[in-house]
Image (cartoon, rainbow, N blue to C red):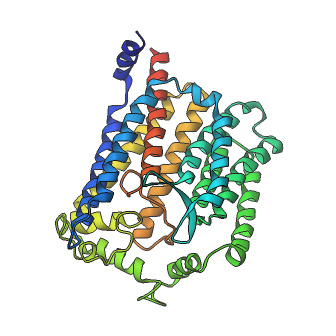
Amino acid sequence: MLFKRYFAGLKNFDWILFGAIFLLICFGLAALYSVAISSEQPNFVNFKKQIIFAIIGLILLFAVSFFDYRIWQDYGYLIYGAVALLLLAVLFFGKTVGGTTGWFMIFGFNFQPVELAKLALIIFLAWFFSTRANLIKDLKVFVQSAAAAGLFFILVILQPDFGSAMVLFMLWLAIAAFSGVNKKYLLISGLILIILSIFAWFFLFQPYQKDRISTFFNPQADPYDRGYHVRQAVTAVGAGGLFGRGLGFGSQSQLKFIPASQTDFIFAVIAEELGFLGVGLVLFFWSLVFCRLIMAVRLARDNFALLFILAVSALFFCQVMINIGMNIGIVPVTGISLPFLSYGGSFLITSLVLIGITESMIIRNQNSRA
């Protein structure tokens, strides 16, 4: 009976949202396959892993949509506490990659707790603000929410992972703004962030992180070292033309000129090999995702669902804009992945779970209207 009711509810499942995300994953897999065949001895390990991650994530998406989304609201604070412990544990027992201690190695797979932190923070803050609607203008509520987000922010900065920490901060800022907090408090928070950024520059940032920011403001100062990554990515994006050079035929990607081509700069690979047409399709699918999320916001029947979907939209929009900005040289390189396209199991699975919860909201909010 339970499964029958679920399958009946699938008629309200947003298949357009799901289809757009599925096609984005396919674009990412195509780019990963192209990068894999560029070696003299092609290595498809990451390509195969990403397929596994995608399958797991899609299964979880449908599984999560099966449950009433209010269960996440009931256990939001427990999820927050568990993820906080993971972020603390990774500082002591985590694996260091590229100067950042932010990964656990589990059965040959790297797991990044900061991606779970995005999920946990969205759930917690959506629950927190939705249960304090009548007190939303109070300074106490604002400070408590800032403290909750600040704990995650500090634990991630200590890894150090400045890019992810900034995403967490922007998530909190977006949810706080959507919930209707006093705008004066948000302005003060922005000033505090500037002060913290100055402090981090002198006492927390690693040399390579300072180089990334310096390169953004003056990429020609050291074009063959610090500015190399950005220059090669921009060259690849411009070389694609209208139709691209063909999958597997991009000189920048195939000859390994593009750094981190499977993660940070996968957009440059797509632009070079599939051209303006391929990039246009990627942007079209993302536009479709955001349009469907906005429609889901309009369907929301309670504050928790409303804030949750708005936060998911803000998270994806933030990461898409930052990643594409990195690839075309208008944003500093911060290691932010392109959702559903970049290689990485932690964020892919977490992102699909976020969509699964959103689908649960869509299904049940439409049922409540019927």
In the figure, is residue 262 to the left or right of 162? Answer: left
Rendered position, 323 above or below 353? below
**Rendered location of residue 334, percent (x, y):** 52, 68
**Rendered location of residue 288, percent (x, y):** 35, 44
Taking the view exactly as shown, the residue that stands out farthest to the front is 107
Counting labels gives 0
Taking the view exactly as shown, the residue that stands out farthest to the top is 1
**Rendered location of residue 177, percent (x, y):** 65, 46
Camera-nearest residue between 108 and 344: 108
Camera-nearest residue between 286 and 227: 227
In the figure, is residue 154 to the left or right of 263? Answer: right
Camera-nearest residue between 96 and 151: 96
| Residue name at image x 58 percent, y 31 percent | 72
Please say whether residue 280 is visible from this viewpoint.
yes
Rendered position, 275 above or below 258? above
Rendered position, 140 above or below 166? above
| Residue name at image x 36 percent, y 22 percent | 10
Q: Quadrant of the N terminus?
A: top left
**Rendered location of residue 213, percent (x, y):** 55, 77
| Residue name at image x 22 percent, y 76 percent | 251
Q: Quadrant of the C terminus?
A: top left
Rendered position, 359 above or below 286? above
Please say whether residue 177 is visible from this viewpoint.
no
| Residue name at image x 64 percent, y 34 percent | 76
